[in-house]
Amino acid sequence: MSRKPCYFCFLIGLIFMFALTGCAKPQTFSPDKPPDNPAPEPSRTPTQIPGLAPSPMPSVTPTLTPAPPKAISQWLFSGSYARADTGAPCAQRLSVGSVILGAEADSCVPAATGGSAEILVQAPPGEPYQIALLRVVCADSGEDCTTAVQATEPGGVLSIFVDDQLLWQADCTSLPLAECTSRFLSPAPTFAFRVGETAVSRLQIKTSPNISWQISDLQIEWQPIPDQLQGIAYSPFRDCQNPHWGPLPSPDELRDDLLLIRHMGNAVRTYSSVGVQGQIPAIAQELGLRVVAGADLGPDRAKNEAEIDALIQLAQQDDGIESVIVGNEVLLRGDLTEAELIADISACRRP
């Protein structure tokens, strides 16, 4: 027996659906357009409801964790600087804890004497060595650090030191200020340095005369140094220096370079073992850097033998040498045949 459709029931159900859809108008949202009826912003002050008794207070009042103070508040300042808490008219635009390092306290213009900020830092326990990432925040508003530097004629120098060793420097004495800051500073510059677990390091930020640097905060993040070998291929020759005819880098220049490199990794790879480059392993070991020592080979047989003899001597002295590399791109350049290179490698293996 078939059942006839109830057209009246269908009509009643359709009317009911239209009534439901009319009760709630759909809202469309977009990143640029707010909703038609946005929800009211919750009040920050609790609203008292009349006629209701207040809820009993908990037996233990929860302790509110205060917001961590700015890292810069822990720093010791000297020389010329302007801070927001000094009451100077020029510093009233600064947020609490901010500083203009190297500025006159009253006028905020670059001072004739430099300024310095100093703090002692120690890595958290648990790792023998850690990398400290120092991030410089120049303005709470997000304004980048390339506009936070001011200078008078002539310009000056911005420097960061770790234990009295230069970590970073921006020399603006011979450059226009805009070019100097764009070359040496990023919007939020970050600098890395290494600290031992039990060692305390002294960190300094300095400005020379005639240059100032506005800093809102200095933040330090710690990262452990991986155990595996992480090195930097190091060629010590600077501008206008040449390994073939000179001038050659001095031992002091080698030390300055390796002091910077030790904050970037835990090993160096060298390309030669004769002359000034043969001094790299001893300096690197003194600074806690491991070494992968190289022998620079080429078409000159006498020079190759000198490189091999020097490499063997360095390895026997055990100046922190992890391994050796004999020859670099000699097959690519065609300086030696495969058989000649194998013979030189075998010579380095002799006791």
Image: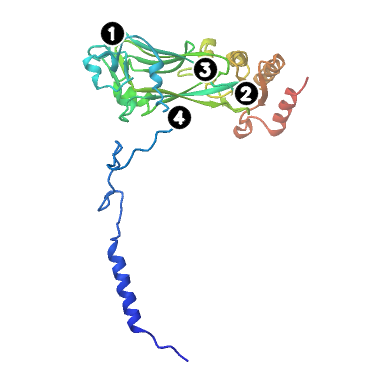
N-terminal-most mark, 4 or 3: 4
Q: Position of residue 270 (x, y in %)?
A: 60, 22
Looking at the rendered structure, the secondary structure element under dot 1 is loop
- Mark whose residue sits in front, 1 or 3: 3
Q: Nearer the viewer, residue 260 or 141?
A: 141
- Seen at 49% across and 11% down, the residue is 163
Q: Quadrant of residue 148?
A: top left
The crowd level at tag 3 (other Cα within 10 Å; few <14, some 14-19, many 20+) is some
- According to the picture, the residue beneath numbered tag 3 turns out to be 122
- Mark whose residue sits in front, 2 or 4: 4
Looking at the rendered structure, the secondary structure element under dot 2 is loop
Q: Is residue 107 above or below residue 132?
A: above
> What is the three-letter code of the residue carrying label 1?
Ala
Distance between the Cα atoms at labels 4 and 1?
A: 57 Å
Q: Position of residue 91 (x, y in %)?
A: 25, 18
> What is the three-letter code of the residue carrying label 4?
Val
- Mark whose residue sits in front, 1 or 2: 1
Distance between the Cα atoms at labels 4 and 3?
A: 36 Å
Q: Nearer the viewer, residue 130 or 303?
A: 130
- According to the picture, the residue beneath numbered tag 2 turns out to be 296
**Label 2 with label 4: CB-CB less than 8 Å:** no
Q: Position of residue 73 (x, y in %)?
A: 38, 17
- According to the picture, the residue beneath numbered tag 4 turns out to be 60
Looking at the rendered structure, the secondary structure element under dot 3 is loop
N-terminal-most mark, 2 or 4: 4
